[in-house]
Image (spheres, coloured by chain):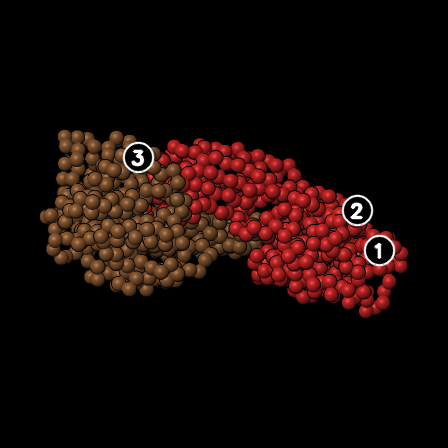
Chain colours: A red, B brown
Amino acid sequence: MSRLALSDTDKQARDWFADTTKSLGCKVIVDAMGNQFAIREGLKEGPPTVAGSHLDTQPTGGRYDGILGVTAGIEMLRTLHNNSITTTFPVGVVNWTNEEGARFPISMVSSGVWAGSIPLSHAHDLKEVGTGSATMKSELERIGYLGDKDCSFEAVPLAAHFELHIEQGPILEAENRKVGIVQGVQAYKWFTVSVRGADCHTGTTSFSHRADALLVASKMIVYSHRAAARKGALASTGILTLKPGSTNTVPGSVDFSLDIRSPDNHIVSEVEADCKTAFAKIAAGEDVEGLNTDFVASSKSCSVDWKLDTDSPATKFHPECISCVEDAAKSIFGGETQALTKPMTSGAGHDSVYTSKRCPTTMIFVPSRDGVSHNPVEFTKPEDCAMGAQVLMQAVLRYDRK
Amino acid sequence: MSRLALSDTDKQARDWFADTTKSLGCKVIVDAMGNQFAIREGLKEGPPTVAGSHLDTQPTGGRYDGILGVTAGIEMLRTLHNNSITTTFPVGVVNWTNEEGARFPISMVSSGVWAGSIPLSHAHDLKEVGTGSATMKSELERIGYLGDKDCSFEAVPLAAHFELHIEQGPILEAENRKVGIVQGVQAYKWFTVSVRGADCHTGTTSFSHRADALLVASKMIVYSHRAAARKGALASTGILTLKPGSTNTVPGSVDFSLDIRSPDNHIVSEVEADCKTAFAKIAAGEDVEGLNTDFVASSKSCSVDWKLDTDSPATKFHPECISCVEDAAKSIFGGETQALTKPMTSGAGHDSVYTSKRCPTTMIFVPSRDGVSHNPVEFTKPEDCAMGAQVLMQAVLRYDRK
Ligand SMILES: NC(=O)NCCC(=O)O
Ligand SMILES: NC(=O)NCCC(=O)O
């Protein structure tokens, strides 16, 4: 699945979302970030309790990440509609824009704007990654999804936000469990690290005359994994671009992404600080854990710069929402609840991180085969998806009745 | 300077070359690789003695690499023309296509076809690097330089080939010398190394569940420098592309270029063999010189594949051509010849590598400031360029009279 945010295929999915939820009796609001809120009236007026997630994917993503949460929400609307059930307050489904951060490089950017954590203008001006020049605003306009509603928790308040999502990790499957009751989300920071040296000829320039930005970046990438592993954290580089890009020219310029994660904010900061110190040494040609003693004494140094792209501190979800999910699970699994469910911390960020700042929020996980996600082979069994959808609907209805 | 082979600006330079040499009394032949041969009649018929080099550049190249050899050749034609000098046999200037290998990834590809070392169809089908789909043939057609002459040493024979070029290294400048008398060219091989792992989510996938193609490639790049440095050879990576390219997806796929050089063919082969063994271990997660003991025991391996793109064995130039250059230098520098010239081996490949297979060949080097090349700050003093042009013309005329 490749449905990058605000692409032509994303527009198709959005149109489908709007048509389908309208046919199920909903009113659909689109805000200035293109977030779609499908809302079904209740007995009383008030903010809706919603099931929310996203329809965008990674460039080579799967068919479940985000999508399951939205389609299960629509399934809930269909069940209410077909059975003519009236909830106490409105309920609804939300499709958040560019959750992945894959095309526009801030993840969960549109729930972030809704929560007041990211300025609208900053989000609108975000450029797509790569060589293109499109911005979020230009693409929202192009596909007709620059809504006239303010993007904010004040303009579109929510009573509570429940998100069904695939685990994207191996734990539930390994332990033979069906449902993760998510307590919170680990912290993460995303950086762009820029290394600058000098372009030179690969055939005529001795190692000691080089300032090789790619060799330096390679050492930094190796180091970041060591630094994270020592603290039980994660470090990852998913993007690396270099210039000028010719077999016989040593690259003078490299930019790479660095994603550092841990359930503990302090550990993320420690790994960041460790990398900052070590990267400066590596760029200066000083030795760091044997990485710079490679018989290549470079007399020229590179420079290194860090830019913080995303800072998502550890999140704790709302006890009332969590207990609605627990109760829903108990009513479904009965005596097996303990064996088939598990309290968990999410490794990935989700729109629920931002909604939790402005309304009670929690998440429900279902198993991912081999723990694989952000990959076309991502898979969750149909019966596990159905079980997750069941828990989602019951949790929403329980919250609505509270 | 950015004049990639067969781009619109390359067409402009080619048109200028043709107009200028025609105005100096030459006939211009264009062959099936777009090589331009400007030939000036002599007293007798026979193959011409030529000054040859190239007008294409790196993506961020300088104003001397290749260009000096062609413009100095034209200066020679102008001197002969203005002074109404008739040579014994024809003399001329050659502009070889895509010497850099920057846009179409085989360097010196068109002198290679001329020499019979590279099949025409292989060269024609070469795709431009990056995401474009143009081939050499489609671009030759597009800019009107797919000539009707066969590209071969039989269709366009040369009596001898002299190439004036900037050193692209630091030696002449450091030793305060004016002219390098080039004895040969070091060996080099270019490879594309492909590493395949699996895309996965950076937030939910523990190190032990990853097959991270970029981490593995980074270790390989670090290792290749160690392996080369131990043997006094060079190793360089100038191109690296990865997929899918998203901050929160571990890359499952990386391709990078590897350029290995040494004056000794055997040493290039030894470094290649060393890297092949080590890369296989690195990809399999086995330890290699501490690079894989980074507290990151990956239980999943990557695969690694090698493709040979260019194989340019060490070249020895022709004694008769070398002695023409020596004599030219003596007539210019007199008693200072020993102090101001130096016998050298070229670190970079040049079209003279291929012409030397089919006709007597040598090269003349002039100093490069700070040894810098393949970089916009590339610089050679005007008086050094003039001195090189002087030696070039005299060497050509001496060879013609032999
Ligand atoms: N679930 C998910 O892939 N979210 C994107 C943000 C992150 O990388 O954690
Ligand atoms: N002189 C030059 O840059 N030639 C290209 C082939 C090489 O990289 O040696």
Q: Is residue B291 visible?
A: no
- Circles 3 and 2 in contact, beta carbons < 8 Å: no
Residue plotted at (73% across, 43% down): A116
Q: Which mark is residue A400?
A: 1
Q: Is residue A9 left or right of residue B318?
A: right
Residue plotted at (80% across, 58% down): A39
Question: Looking at the picture, which amino acid does disc 2 mark?
Answer: Glu
Q: Farthest residue toward the right?
A: A44
Q: B16 above or below A23?
A: above
**Could you tell me which secondary element the residue under label 3 belongs to?**
loop
Q: Position of residue A185 (x, y in %)?
A: 68, 47
Task: Report if the beta carbon of the residue with label 1 is closer than 8 angstroms to ligand 1.
Answer: no
Q: Position of residue B198 (x, y in %)?
A: 52, 56
Which numbered mark, 3 or 2, is in the foreground of this view?
3
Real-space Cα separation, disc 3 to disc 2, in angstroms: 68 Å
Question: Looking at the picture, which amino acid does disc 3 mark?
Answer: Lys
Q: Position of residue B110 (x, y in %)?
A: 29, 56
Q: Are marks 2 and 1 on the same chain?
A: yes
The number of callouts visible is 3
Q: Which mark is residue A154?
A: 2
Which numbered mark, 2 or 1, is in the foreground of this view?
2
Task: Choose between A402 and A245: the one closer to the eye.
Answer: A245
Q: Is residue B339 visible?
A: yes
